[in-house]
Image (cartoon, rainbow, N blue to C red):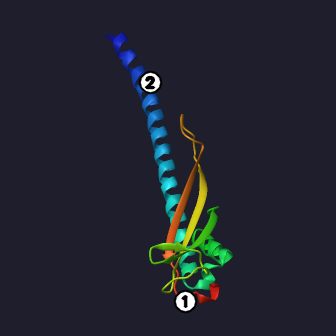
Amino acid sequence: MNIRRRDRRGSAMTEFALCSTVLIMMAVGGTDLARVFSLGTALTQAAKAGAQFGAFSSPNAANASGISAAAQAAAPGVGMQVTSARTCMCGETVITCGAGTCGSEPVMYLQVQTSSTYSAFMPYWGSAASIPVSGRARLRVNGVFTSLR
């Protein structure tokens, strides 16, 4: 009877070691997943801030450095690339901004995209060590932009 008792004490330690390893890996994986979503949210908010700056007026929509600065200020500490593009619509037709003819005043839209790369705490088997993450916002530009023609 004493022999069985000693065997069980050692098995509890072994079970704890195996289970705790799996639980720690799951906790770190959950933390990585949460940080990826947090970065995605920060990039989307930064894209919205850049689009709001550019959508204020036509000259702002053409100011790529101002749009980038507004996006960077909205997410300090996040290393990101910011790109912006203007699109003009005449009804349902996309036209080149400042060119072409339109029966009515064309409508200008500004799209801002932010992107960054997330590096995982602990790369898992079969997963990438770095994950590309991006955010995007599209707003209509206010004001008359006849000065762009």
Image point (61%, 80%), residue name: 99
Mark toward the viewer: 2 or 1: 1
Image point (50%, 44%), residue name: 28
Q: Residue furthest left?
A: 1
Query: Which comes before the other along the chain, label 2 or label 1?
Result: 2
Among the 4 quarters of the image, the one containing residue 23:
top left
Q: Relative to residue 60, is residue 24 drawn left or right?
A: left
Amino acid at the residue labelled 2: Thr
* Residue identified by numbered label 2: 14
Depth order, front residue of 16/75: 75
SS state under label 1: loop
Depth order, front residue of 62/126: 62
Image point (63%, 84%), residue name: 148
Position above or below: 2 against 73: above
**x then y, percent, for residue 7:** 39, 15
**x then y, percent, for residue 106:** 51, 82
- Identify the mark at residue 88; answer none if there is no mark: none
Depth order, front residue of 26/99: 99
Image point (54%, 64%), residue name: 43
* Residue identified by numbered label 1: 144
- Badge 1 crowding class, 10 Å Cα cut-off, few under 14, some 14 to 19, many 20 or more, is few
